Amino acid sequence: MLLSRIAPNFTLSYSRRLYSSLRKANMKLLYPTSLKLDVQSLEGFAPSLHPYDVKVPIPDEHADAEILVTWANSADNLKDAARKLTGLRWIQSLAAGPNDVLAAGFAEGVVVTTGSGLHDRTVAEHALGLLLTAARRFDEMREFQLQRKWPRHLGGAQPDRPKDRFTTLRDANVLVWGYGNIAKTLAPHLTAWGAVVKGVARSAGVRDGVEVYAEDRLPDLLPKTDALVMILPGSESTRDVLNKRTLALLPKHAWVVNVGRGTSIDEDALADALERGQLGGAALDVFKTEPLPESSRLWATPNVLVSPHAAGGRPQDAEALIAYNLRRFLAGQELKNVV
């Protein structure tokens, strides 16, 4: 009697587990060939792994893929994937901001996770390099070298930490606008060199020992800033936030470093401020239009360092993030970095 009552439930439970196992065994994961991945570290999970070219349409044989990993995909490739991969359930972007994926037209039910955290070290390192270039004027030294001229004003006896110039990180007031993971990676390196670091974010608080202020405090913070590091995401709320009004709040010797998104700066207002001597300089890794058009004023604007979106571009430890999320995906658990 007891067995007869249990058997139907046991059979149903077993059937569900068997179906789930078979489905996972037939599941496909597509990974990009646009970067070198340690694919062996991803083997052993249920889904089969298949490489794909991010610049051409997805092969028809992979139209049944349920998981897509993206990196440096062309817009046409993503649009094709959105149309063709009708059974897609999850996209793991390796970019910190997956704007390209979100604009491709994937079905609403597809879960999208970002590569947040994979670029913290590289972007922080690049930002540090731009700050040191701004302070030590390595760019100007190179210009003089190409002219076979000795830049006497950059060498020899120099004033120590002058108040009217940004020449060193020691005792410099560095304000990081957009205080997230990259900023938390950068800040210890700045403080190690003696900089006074403060942050600006949507909410105030203390993060790893750094005072972070809400954006309504910018009018108080910008006038005391020697170097402004911008690491803002690209969105309508951050468009042109560094504009004529906010630029006017910065001291004339201050430098702007942008390793976030180019849309956060009004480029004409920035060029105007630099041409009028109202700002020390700008070291920019991102721009509204990339590559930067030949017609852009920024090429010839004084004291502008153009970096060709080189801060990121090399996700680190991507396999660990993919494996972590894949394990949780198969277990039906919440994924990391969900948009």
Image (cartoon, rainbow, N blue to C red):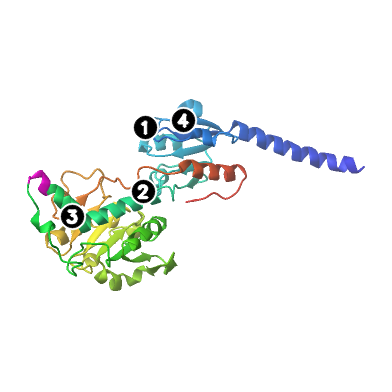
Q: Amino acid at mark 3?
A: Arg
Q: Secondary structure at mark 3?
A: loop
Mark sitting earlier along the chain (2/1): 1
Q: Which residue is mark 2?
A: 122
Q: Is residue 282 visible?
A: no
Q: Amino acid at mark 1?
A: Lys
Query: In the displayed image of the protein, which residue is found farthest to the right?
Result: 1
Magenta segment's dominant SS is helix
Please state the horizontal and vertical placement of residue 273, each as a whole percent of the image.
16, 62
Quarter of the image for the N terminus: give it: top right
Is residue 179 toward the left or the right of residue 29 in the image?
A: left
Q: Which residue is mark 3?
A: 137
* 177 relative to 130, above or below: below
Is residue 313 toward the left or the right of residue 29 in the image?
A: left
Please state the horizontal and vertical placement of residue 322, each as a whole percent of the image.
51, 42
Choose mark 2 or mark 3, whichever is in front: 3
Is residue 39 toward the left or the right of residue 171 in the image?
A: right
Q: Decide: marks 3, 4 in contact (CB < 8 A)? A: no
Q: Which residue is mark 4?
A: 51
Q: Which residue is mark 1?
A: 55
Q: Amino acid at mark 2?
A: Thr
Mark sitting earlier along the chain (2/4): 4
Kindly indicate the quadrant of the structure image that contains residue 274: bottom left
Q: Residue at x 79, y 37 (%)?
A: 11
Mark sitting earlier along the chain (3/4): 4
